Image: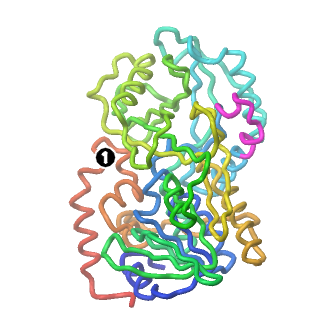
């Protein structure tokens, strides 16, 4: 089945005045997972995003599928167990979620050797296996290094996980349209009329739905205030920034987890193809537009990293990226705000905040059950969401354009094929090729109508 510029155009041509059971605002991992479940239950569902699918937080994470050693250290055993259960499922069922070994580095800033040893035993037990961590003193030689323990978690391409859920929802009869912004909501009898504006080729459409799922991540307060004229209390935004560096100075067999000597925040060094990703920061911000790394964050990450790799300098930095975490909770320290998700129901708008990518299936099921109760529809969520879409063929670029609705070069480089996060040139050598392929595809005879 095709899911492309042409099917998008066809969907838009039939959109005006249509009525849906559920309109999902936000094409990140939460919206994608919910759309997948609702489509599997034969609900009339439409998902829209003002940008590309996964263009917000869901393509700018650390790209880890994990239980979170930090959450375990904070005493959140149930959350850690739930996350590890989801990690195990994703590793078993998806070939693009891959196991990754991590070295926990023990030095003057880390937890004690004993704490890490017993913590990893508990972490492994919560993940469903008994594995005693082995202590080694090799691999690193920086000042203060005393040894390392190795454990397993997983890594993925976060945007690809979103895209697979989006396409799976479409395969089951759902509608998903990128670059389509919900600009206003108006209650009309038992329905909500939403105005949608095409940010790719212009055009305005009005659709009706029985309810709205506000899964717009850092922008949930914008959608919420449009609908209610109020704002959500205790909604917080935290920025997590990462540096992308050349891999040649890193003698890495595994990824590494360490605590910064500056403030003892846990950080990761993650090998990805030709590069290494290092992060992340955790700082409150006031706006979703604060989604780029500032000089203080850059210095913090480099100074933290130089404790382990003293020869790293600015010339090794290829690029950076930042994601905005939509959190729900109080407190002055962003690291102490709960990483459990929160669901708010106001009239016919369900708003969700604080979902970790590892936990998206559990959150999507919880949201879908609430939708079933509100709409008085029996909702099967067992084993859902499932990924029905699988990439096929030998031409990934053709697949991105023809099967995954990539409309721009950035869609391909960042959110379909991941060049930005895995190659030294961040996809620059592919730009002209991608531009030509997209142009040639769109220049074909009129189709799909």
- Name the residue located 53 percent from the left edge and 76 percent from the top edge: 186
Q: Quadrant of residue 81?
A: top right
Q: From the viewer's perspective, is 320 left or right of 384?
A: left
- Name the residue located 78 percent from the left edge and 76 percent from the top edge: 378
User: Magenta stretch: residue 78 in it?
Assistant: yes
- Name the residue located 44 percent from the left edge and 69 percent from the top edge: 183
> Where is residue 280 drawn, in percent x and y?
48, 34
Residue extent of the magenta highlight: 70-82
- Name the residue located 24 percent from the left edge and 72 percent from the top edge: 439
Query: For the residue labelled by badge 1, is the local secondary structure a helix, a strand or a loop?
Result: loop
**Mark 1 crowdedness (10 Å alpha carbons): few <14, some 14-19, many ≥20:** many
Circle 1 residue: 426
Q: From the viewer's perspective, is 81 left or right of 111?
A: right
Q: Identify whether 328 is placed above or below 214.
A: above
Q: Main secondary structure of the magenta part?
A: helix
Residue reaching furthest to the top: 143
Residue reaching furthest to the bottom: 449
Q: Can the viewer see residue 171?
A: no
> Where is residue 66 drawn, in percent x and y?
62, 41
């Amino acid at each position: 089945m095709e899911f492309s510029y042409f099917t998008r155009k066809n969907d838009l041509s039939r959109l005006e005045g249509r009525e849906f059971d559920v309109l999902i605002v936000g094409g990140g991992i939460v919206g994608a997972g919910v759309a997948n479940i609702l489509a599997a239950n034969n609900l009339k569902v439409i998902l829209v995003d003002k940008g590309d699918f996964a263009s917000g937080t869901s393509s700018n994470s650390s790209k880890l599928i994990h239980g979170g050693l930090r959450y375990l250290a904070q005493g959140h055993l149930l959350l850690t167990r739930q996350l590890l259960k989801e990690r195990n499922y994703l590793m078993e069922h998806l070939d693009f979620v891959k196991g990754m070994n991590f070295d926990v580095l023990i030095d003057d800033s880390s937890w004690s050797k004993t704490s890490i040893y017993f913590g990893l035993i508990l972490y492994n037990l919560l993940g469903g296996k008994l594995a005693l961590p082995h202590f080694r003193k090799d691999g690193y030689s920086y000042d203060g290094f005393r040894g390392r323990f190795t454990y397993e978690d997983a890594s993925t391409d976060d945007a690809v996980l979103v895209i697979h859920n989006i396409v799976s929802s479409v395969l089951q009869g759902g509608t998903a349209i990128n670059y389509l912004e919900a600009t206003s909501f108006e209650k009309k009898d038992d329905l909500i009329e939403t105005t949608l504006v095409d940010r790719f080729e212009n055009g305005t459409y009005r659709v009706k739905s029985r309810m709205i799922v506000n899964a717009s991540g850092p922008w949930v307060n914008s959608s919420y205030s449009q609908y209610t004229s109020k704002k959500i209390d205790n909604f917080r935004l935290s920025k997590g920034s990462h540096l992308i560096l050349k891999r040649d100075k890193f003698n890495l067999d595994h990824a590494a987890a360490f605590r910064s000597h500056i403030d003892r925040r846990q950080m990761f060094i993650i090998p990805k193809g030709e590069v290494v990703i290092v992060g992340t920061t955790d700082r409150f911000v006031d706006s979703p537009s604060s989604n780029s790394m500032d000089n203080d964050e850059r210095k913090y990450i480099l100074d933290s990293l130089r404790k382990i790799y003293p020869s790293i300098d600015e010339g090794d930095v290829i690029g950076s990226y930042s994601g905005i975490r939509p959190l729900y909770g109080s407190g002055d320290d962003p690291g102490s705000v709960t990483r459990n998700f929160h669901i708010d129901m106001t009239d016919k708008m369900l708003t969700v905040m604080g979902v970790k990518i590892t936990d998206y299936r559990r959150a999507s099921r919880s949201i879908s059950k609430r939708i079933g109760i509100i709409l008085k529809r029996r909702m099967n969520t067992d084993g859902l969401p499932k990924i029905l879409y699988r990439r096929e063929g030998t031409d990934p670029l053709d697949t991105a354009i023809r099967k995954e609705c990539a409309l721009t070069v950035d869609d391909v480089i960042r959110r379909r094929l991941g060049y930005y996060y895995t190659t030294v040139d961040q996809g620059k050598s592919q730009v002209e090729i991608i531009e030509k392929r997209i142009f040639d595809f769109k220049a074909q005879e009129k189709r799909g109508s």
